[in-house]
């Protein structure tokens, strides 16, 4: 099974750019999109679907903002939108689907915002989600968390760590929450498999950062420890364009 995550920075934008052509080649079973910035009723029925997939939408109440979508080849055993906390769910940040053996969470973690003003909201989201995951783990569930975490964990995960120590995305208190997830039964499977590999998944549109590969690794697969043996590979598709992020795929053994 192949699961691909991608922050698209606007679903209508990637449609205009015809930036989903890679799907037929990469051929994921599940596509997790973040920051869709659209409600399905704002686009045509044809545009709401990727050929060969069924869509699950969780749009933000605010127009042109946030939101997530999941496209599946095979219907999940169950699907759920949100985490049951209104101040997070109005922003359409989470879709959960169940397949035999595990749950997949597609997540658009909050950005700390201008002047770091939304950092407390972001950290509260991290905490609330981990509480849910702790309960699921206690009940014997296996979990795949994927999406845009909006945090670079270690210095290897961004090009200029020293100059970003006081900026959201690399604040000590944000990075500490990634540590907490790893202490609570999760594994950053890309870093587990490739401990010294520099691979970024986001580049600012300014200063030609992508051409210079001045980026951040913000898009992750954190998976339950029991799933590690089932992983075949994790691939960062840095050559796929269309957004300021690139897709990342997790390949599980059959």
Image (cartoon, grey):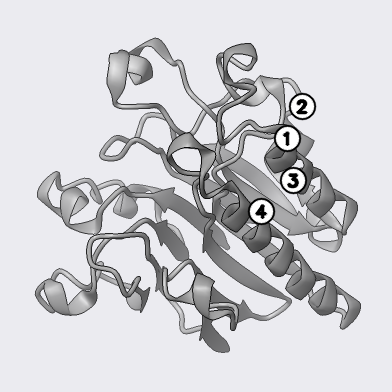
Q: Is residue 122 above or below residue 238?
A: below
Query: Could you give the CA–CA distance between mark 3 and mark 1, rounded to whole angstroms?
Result: 12 Å
Disc 4 versus disc 1: distance between alpha carbons?
A: 22 Å
Residue 228 vs residue 10, the one in the foreground: 10
Give the residue displayed 62% in from the left and 33% down from the top.
152
Disc 1, disc 2: CB below 8 Å? yes
Q: CA distance from mark 4 to mark 2?
A: 26 Å
Residue displayed at 86% across by 62% down: 226
Q: Which residue is mark 2?
A: 195
Q: Left or right of 135: which side holds 254?
A: left
Mark 4 or mark 1, which is nearer to you? 4
Which one is nearer the viewer's eye here, 130 or 71? 130
Q: Which label sits in the foreground, 3 or 1? A: 3
Q: Counting other residues with Cα less than 10 Å from the Cα at mark 1, is it few (<14), some (14-19), or many (20 or more)?
A: some
Q: Secondary structure at mark 4?
A: helix
- Which residue bears the numbered disc 3? 178
Secondary element type, mark 3 = helix
In space, the residues marked 2 and 3 are separated at their CA atoms by 16 Å
> Between disc 3 and disc 4, whose residue precedes?
4
For label 1, the residue is 191
Occupied quadrant, residue 121? bottom right
Q: Which class describes the residues within 10 Å of circle 2: few (<14), some (14-19), or many (20+)?
A: few
């Amino acid at each position: 099974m192949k699961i691909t995550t991608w922050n698209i920075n606007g679903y209508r934008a990637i449609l205009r750019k015809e930036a989903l052509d890679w799907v037929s080649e990469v051929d994921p079973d599940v596509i997790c999109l973040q920051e869709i910035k659209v409600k399905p009723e704002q686009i045509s029925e044809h545009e709401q679907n990727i050929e060969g997939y069924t869509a699950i939408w969780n749009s933000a109440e605010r127009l042109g903002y946030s939101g997530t979508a999941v496209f599946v080849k095979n219907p999940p055993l169950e699907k759920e939108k949100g985490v049951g906390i209104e101040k997070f769910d109005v922003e359409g940040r989470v879709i959960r689907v169940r397949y035999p053996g595990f749950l997949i969470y597609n997540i658009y973690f909050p950005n700390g915002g201008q002047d770091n003003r939304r950092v407390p909201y972001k950290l509260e989201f991290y905490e609330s989600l981990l509480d849910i995951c702790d309960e699921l783990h206690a009940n014997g569930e296996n979990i795949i968390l994927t999406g845009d975490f909006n945090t670079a964990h270690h210095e290897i995960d961004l090009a200029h760590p020293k100059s970003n120590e006081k900026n959201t995305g690399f604040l000590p208190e944000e990075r500490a929450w990634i540590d907490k997830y790893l202490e609570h039964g999760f594994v950053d499977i890309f870093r587990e498999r490739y401990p010294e590999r520099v691979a970024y998944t986001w580049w600012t549109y300014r200063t030609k950062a992508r051409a210079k590969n001045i980026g951040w690794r913000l898009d992750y697969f954190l998976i339950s420890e029991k799933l590690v043996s089932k992983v075949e590979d994790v691939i960062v598709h840095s050559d796929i364009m269309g957004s300021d992020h690139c897709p990342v795929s997790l390949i599980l053994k059959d």
